[in-house]
Amino acid sequence: MTTAKNGSLPSVSSWVTRFLPAIPRDGGRVLDAACGLGRHSVLAALYGYPVLAVDRDDDFALRASGFPEIEFRKTDLETGSWPLGDELFSGIIVVNYLNRPLFPELVRHLAPGGVLIYQTFTKAHAEANGKPANPDHWLKSGELLTLVSPLTVTAFEEGRAANSFVERIVAVREKDDGEAERFPLAAFP
């Protein structure tokens, strides 16, 4: 695995790459929650989305300054009150991070027609790799399907992806008229 210390980035999630074009291009921002080194923030910026990248570590702060489309905000999503106010996001990306109490906030901050793209480790990953060691940081089989309620699930997978065992989901918040967004997938620009 690569780290910020050696100056390289881990590869982006193929799930995020596949579904990022589904996020509405309505001028709203994309939230990259627990962004880590910012690989998905950069990808979203390359697609032309304005991005708010948040993480408790500031490993990405300097790199984000090279992208005017990206605002980096150092914040701990696990302590205190929700740090993002009432802002709505056209898309929310979360990869390799699990904090179950965060899901109601993610749902609340997704704009009507907005898309949640989420991927993280399962119990099978912990059993095969010894990490994450804390059971609070891995999903039980099918758990993401219940955590994203009341969003409309448009894609879901569970299983092996590269060297990881993950669950991943794409879910859409219904528009005000009660309709879920029907989106065409687009190729990388």
Image (cartoon, rainbow, N blue to C red):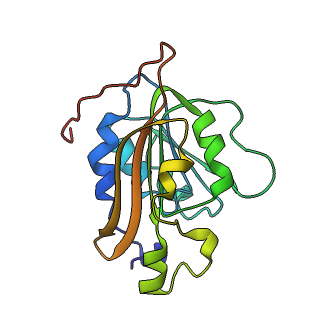
Q: Which residue is more in the foreground, 94 or 182?
A: 182
Quadrant containing the C terminus is top left
Q: Locate residue 172: give its quadrant.
A: top left
Q: Residue furthest left?
A: 187
Do we see residue 165 in this rendering?
yes
The residue positioned 72% from the left and 44% from the top of the image is 83
Q: Position of residue 75 (x, y in %)?
A: 69, 53
- Give the total number of marks visible in the rendering: 0
Q: Is residue 9 visible?
A: no
**Which residue does the image show at 36% across and 26% down from the upper left?**
25
- Within the image, what quadrant is residue 183 found in? top left
Identified at 58% across, 82% down, the residue is: 133
Q: Nearer the viewer, residue 133 or 28?
A: 133
Q: Residue at x 43, y 77 (%)?
A: 125
Q: Is residue 137 above or below residue 85?
A: below
Which residue sits furthest right? 80
Relative to 132, residue 120 above or below: above
Instruction: Give x and y (percent) for residue 7.
Output: 41, 72
Residue 160 versus residue 183 in the image, above or below: below
Please indicate whether residue 102 sits to the left or right of residue 92 in the image: right
Q: Quadrant of the N terminus?
A: bottom left
- Residue 63 % position (x, y): 47, 57
Q: Is 180 above or below relative to 147? A: above
Q: Is residue 128 left or right of residue 99?
A: left
